[in-house]
Image (tube, rainbow, N blue to C red):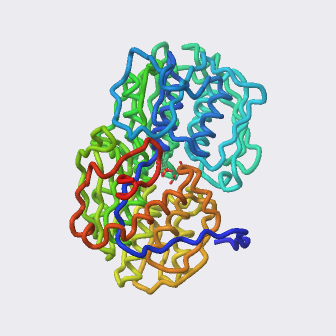
Amino acid sequence: METLPEASSWWPAPTASGLLDAAVSLPGSKSLTARALVLAAAAREPTTLTGVLRSRDTDLMTGALRTLGAGITEVADATATDAEALPATADTGAGTRLRVTPSSLPLHVAPGGSVDCGLAGTVMRFVPALAVLADAPVVLDGDPAARLRPMAPLLEVLSTLGATVTYLGRPGFLPVRIKPDADRLLRPGTGRPSPALGQPHRVKVDASSSSQLLSALLLVAPLLPGGLEVTTTGSVPSMAHVRMTVESLRQRGVTVEEPDTPGPGATWRVLPGRPVGGRLSIEPDLSNAGPFLAAALVAGGTVRVLGWPSSTTQAGDAWRTLLPRMGGSVALAASPVGGQVLPVLSVHGSGQVHGIDADLYDVGELAPTVAALAAVAAHQGRGSRLTGIAHLRGHETDRLAALATEIRRLGGDAQETDDGLVIRPARLHAARLHSYADHRMATFAAVVGLAVPGVEVDDVECTSKTLPGFAGMWQAMLDSTGRRGCEGHRRDQGEPRGEGHRDTGGAGARTARDAQD
Ligand SMILES: O=C(O)C1=C[C@@H](OP(=O)(O)O)[C@@H](O)[C@H](O)C1
Ligand SMILES: C=C(OP(=O)(O)O)C(=O)O
């Protein structure tokens, strides 16, 4: 890894001094929020979204969609009166309510036409696909690290749809200018190339570096007059997120045919027809639940996540199968919380973490947290192997290099493989870790720091990419330490405790004592 400058401030990751007994209420899913915003901007009528995540990534998405002509305003409860409500998932009451008024087609670009993608994969992939339907050129750029993330296979497809793509820096990467030819694309029979009237555009994409390259095309597909057929030329990682895209489209009334077996040559068909509007509630972010649930395994005791959906497309639902393999016990049950009955996921741990041999190809987003648990397991004498995650080299940072480097900085034994990491048993020691501006590297440090005194990390605030206020939530969870002592530990055994955990409507960690106050 490159040599990094010294950080000006270091966040001391707190160690756990006793058994946890915490209830955590997480804000909305980053990935569901991104899809909901894009589909609302593309819809035929206004949409009201509740439980929306406000974070750097989702604020950037909101800004980008405004640049493409959508009206997005925060509204109070009383103004949300849509009659045509979609079935809503139970949310914890946390999160923002937004009213999205779609743009007409072609999408009307605001003066300047520039989009800041920050470091958000969702913005840098989903927005260029929409830009082919704009009425003026759009320039997209982002953070220095964003300029390293794969874009080329998507941009090549956008060229075949008639857009002129100009690389303003390194070919294949941000910054990029997209000059659309929307009039011809939107008039059947006149596009370039021109499918026969009523026929879909047929494109091929290599989405092996990121599922978002495929999701971007699926999201814009219903706006094309004949719809779109997308064939993947390679295999696609993070299939959980592609399924989320398909379900998000279907939920808004769009017809999508999926291949029986995703892989090279598989084809997705999306029929034309703008998504419907109405009301939609966003589930809590289950990937961001990961570090909190992992804390139960490392510190011992119980952590509960409120509002865990009973059925979901989120990658983070895999915690229910991954954490038992690493020594946790997991229970999902309905439980009364603050006057309503919510599904609550309870994870109970002993402080002893098992090693794991896991293929994370479909849920790569969870890998940094699994790696943190694996590092703690190695500290306790147990090795792990993570596979199927070569594409993490194109995430916020090269996560395989970052994880191996930071585990070694802690005194651990971690090696990169072609498609993952091997973490062998070795005692860890205090160290100053780098986050590389990557929210999941910062939370990696927080999880390891529970077990290893003296861990610090630079730039803990980079967690605001998807979870503003992380450090405060983490401390609140730890403040539950020891309050119930061993009695609470034995009594809980992974079962939701219900009544004792009052949710006050904001994201954060609640403890048994808070609930009694
Ligand atoms: O579409 C999405 O919302 C995401 C897809 C995945 O990307 P990759 O396929 O690049 O892993 C995931 O890792 C990312 O955090 C979010
Ligand atoms: C890979 C991630 O994000 P992005 O949406 O920026 O790709 C992530 O959140 O782990």
Q: Quadrant of residue 370?
A: bottom left
Q: Nearer the viewer, residue 145 or 56?
A: 56
Residue 373 in picture, x, y percent from top left: 40, 70
Residue drawn 52% across the image and 74% down it: 404
Residue 30 in picture, x, y percent from top left: 49, 44
Vertical side of 222 occupied by 356: above or below: below
Task: Describe residue 327's horizontal placement relative to residue 404 as left or right.
Answer: left
Task: Describe residue 59's horizontal placement relative to residue 139 as left or right.
Answer: left
Residue 272 appears in the rendering: no
Q: Nearer the viewer, residue 90 or 264?
A: 90
Task: Describe residue 118's horizontal placement relative to residue 383 as left or right.
Answer: right
Task: Describe residue 126's horizontal placement relative to residue 477 as left or right.
Answer: right
Residue drawn 48% across the image and 21% down it: 78
Vertical side of 501 occupied by 93: above or below: above
The count of marks equals: 0
Q: Nearer the viewer, residue 419 or 516?
A: 516
Q: Quadrant of residue 325?
A: bottom left
Residue 139 in picture, x, y percent from top left: 73, 36
Q: Quadrant of residue 256?
A: top left
Residue 119 appears in the rendering: yes
Q: Residue furthest bottom?
A: 427
Q: Residue furthest front?
A: 517
Residue 381 in picture, x, y percent from top left: 36, 84
Residue drawn 62% across the image and 58% down it: 461
Quadrant location of the N terminus in the rendered image:
bottom right
Vertical side of 342 occupied by 389: above or below: below
